[in-house]
Amino acid sequence: MRKLFSLIVLCTTVSSVSAQNIQQLIDQRAKALLPKVIEWRRHLHQNPELGNREFKTMAYIANHLKSLGLEVTTGVAKTGVVAILKGGKPGSVVALRADIDALPIVERTNVPFKSTVMADYLGQQVPVMHACGHDTHVAILMGTAEVLATMKKDVPGTVKFIFQPAEEGPPGTEEGGAPLMVKEGVMDNPKVDAIFGLHIAAGLEIGKIKYKSGAFMASSDWFTIKVKGKGAHGSAPWSGIDPIMISAQIINGLQTIVSRSEDLTKAPVVITVGKFNGGVRENIIPEEVSFSGTIRTLDGAMQKDVYEKIRRTASNIAEALGGTAEVTIDNKTLVTYNTPALVSNTIASLQTAAGAENVSEGTWTTGAEDFSFFGEKAPAFFFNLGGMPKGAQPTSHHTPDFLIDDSMLDVGVKAFCNIVFDYGKVKK
């Protein structure tokens, strides 16, 4: 009995030491790789590309992954990259995702790797900038792939690295982004058991991680409302039906859906009109105008209810004023939902990477992510990584002044690596 007890203690000690050694190796190699991760990030920042046009970015990523000996596929969902690492130990199939596209925004920062790139967007020449931090996501995942490749014999299961194009939305009527990746089977062959992703946060201090179980980021819908009236001379509005005036009433009416019709104690709702097209001359009342905007919800039932109320509000107001309104709603993303059991089992991995004192649960956000489509196919967990310089004021995503401190991107690398070892070791 004593010998059996001693054997159990010995086996437990060896296992514990092995796990501790793995964590130490991850820490050491991620830290040693940090200068390269920063270099990759700054190269990508200086050479941004718009969604479905990330050809140079695709080649840059693929060349690195091939140098690590991974199985690499390019051209997924047009410009995406998928790589497979088969570990030396049995375990699950874990997917890690990074988005790779930039935005049509002019950069106003003074960093030495500032973007001056111009590109075509729907027939117009526009400035291009990584104004949401996707360059950091790519660099972190490239670093994760390198660290895990050096530890391949100890890696449990299979790791699928997904570099996704067009997260900000493909141009015009093109397909793209996570929906197209899912459609092309990225979550199969091998079938993914769980998928993880992160997003740099310009309002969260570097070195920190925030997460939320359940609904985390909002669904995103785009709507367009066409209002038809009757043209008239601007000096005699009573001889026509003014679609601009009707539209103004509808826009005001949409806000009553938020303030008076939805239970905001259950989940937030946002309706924003961001675009208005109508009229050609100051003294001509046009026959037709249109305006467009976005809907953000964090509950599927509320999302459908808002759809119906927008249609009813627009139609009834237009009819009451003698016109008509046609509503079109296009779903862009689903609610980004973090599987509670997966979150619970992953918190320890994040704490190992960043320190328990730097990991905390946050609140949901009305920002949206097409990572949500991957979560329709497997348990998913999406979290935020701090990118704000210590003691600084936060900058806003999707603006010319967006700024990230990249000096602690190794925390993201460590988080992904620890997730692979902690979740992947269970054979599915």
Image (cartoon, helix red, strand yellow):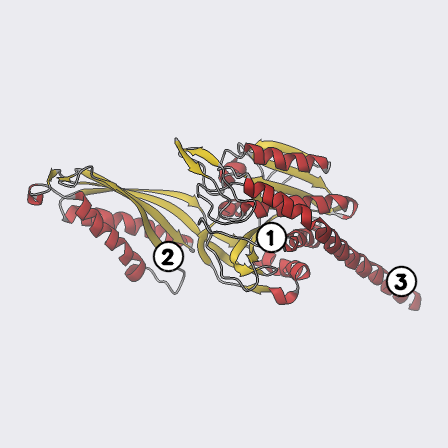
Within 10 Å of disc 1 (Cα), the crowding (few <14, some 14-19, many 20+) is many
In the rendered view, would you say 200 is above or below 175? Answer: below
**Closer to the eye: label 1 or 3:** 1
Q: Amino acid at mark 1?
A: Asp
Q: Nearer the viewer, residue 226 or 126?
A: 126
- The amino acid type of the residue labelled 3 equals Leu
Query: How far across and how far down the image is residue 406, in percent?
Result: 60, 52
Q: Which mark is residue 7?
A: 3
Do labels 1 and 3 touch, CB within 8 Å? no
- Which of the 4 image quarters holds residue 24? bottom right
Using the image, tell me which numbered label, if any, was put on residue 11.
none
Does residue 306 appear left or right of residue 237 in this picture? right
Q: Which secondary structure, mark 3? A: helix
Whichever of labels 3 and 2 marks the residue nearer the N terminus, that label is 3
Total tally of numbered discs in the picture: 3
Alpha carbon of mark 1 to alpha carbon of mark 3: how far? Answer: 47 Å
What residue is pinned by disc 1?
Answer: 406
Vertical arrangement, residue 352 with respect to residue 248, above or below? below
Instruction: Identify the secondary structure beneath mark 2.
Output: strand
Mark 1 falls on what kind of element?
A: loop
User: Residue 269, which numbered label?
Assistant: 2
- Camera-nearest residue between 135 and 267: 135
Nearer the observer, 213 or 250: 250
In the picture provided, is 263 more to the left or to the right than 230?
right
Ranked by sequence position, the earlier of labels 1 and 2 is: 2
Q: Nearer the viewer, mark 3 or mark 2?
A: 2
Give the crowd class for mark 3: few <14, some 14-19, many >=20 residues within 10 Å. Answer: few
The first of marks 1 and 3 along the sequence is 3
Q: Is residue 375 visible?
A: yes
